[in-house]
Amino acid sequence: MSCTLSKCASWVGTVHYMSPERISGGTYSYDSDVWSLGITLLELATATFPYGGGGGSGSGERAQRLGYWDLLDLIVESPPPSSPAHFSAEFKEMISGCLQKLPEARASSTQLRQHRLLVQHAHPPDISAWVQHALTKLFGQRACASADVTGRSTPA
């Protein structure tokens, strides 16, 4: 499909995860999805949205007060969010590759599939196993065993 599609120019999607070029009204392509992946992974890893809290852009309280236009301005004008210092070098490197302001500077999907963070866990990467491993490490075996894939708790 990539050979048949030109750059897109629509404005459809969840603004929280839109890349700077989409918000600015520029054309975009698959590299915009890489930005969205980086924001999503950072949010999952820190348990807070990167703009306005958790990712170094302010406090959690501020995230509650962040308005629509303020969020758009932050995404376009401020430096991209980064991983907290205590995260692994591999994770920080992957997030940094995803969250480059210039689309041409972002990691490609091929580069991300070959990233050492994913390769060290499985080849080809098994994202669900990686998330399960991270949750087990974070919350312990019992917490992960008591939740199914939809996040609903089941009797332990």
Image (tube, rainbow, N blue to C red):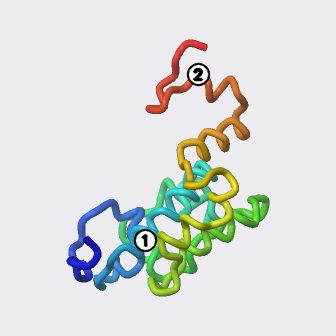
Which residue is located at x 23 percent, y 82 percent? 6
Q: Position of residue 145 (x, y in %)?
A: 61, 24
Amino acid type, mark 2? Ser
Say if mark 2 contacts mark 1, CB within 8 Å. no
Which residue does the numbered mark 2 point to in the structure image?
A: 146
Residue 59, label in figure: none
* Residues packed near mark 1 inside 10 Å, few (<14), some (14 to 19) or many (20 plus): few
Identify the image quadrant of the N terminus.
bottom left
* Residues packed near mark 2 inside 10 Å, few (<14), some (14 to 19) or many (20 plus): few
Numbered disc in front, either 2 or 1: 2
Which residue does the numbered mark 1 point to in the structure image?
A: 70
Identify the image quadrant of the C terminus.
top right
Q: Position of residue 19 (x, y in %)?
A: 41, 73
Amino acid type, mark 1? Asp
Which residue is located at x 51 percent, y 79 percent? 106
Which residue is located at x 56 percent, y 75 percent? 80
126 in relation to 74, above or below: above
Q: Quadrant of residue 61?
A: bottom right
Q: CA distance from mark 2 to mark 1?
A: 38 Å
Task: Report the side of 114 relative to 6 (left or right).
Answer: right
Could you tell me which secondary element the residue under label 1 belongs to? Answer: helix
Which residue is located at x 50 percent, y 71 percent? 110
Q: Position of residue 108 (x, y in %)?
A: 49, 75
Q: Position of residue 78 (x, y in %)?
A: 53, 80
Task: Report the side of 74 relative to 156 (left or right).
Answer: left
Question: Nearer the N terminus, badge 2 or badge 1?
Answer: 1
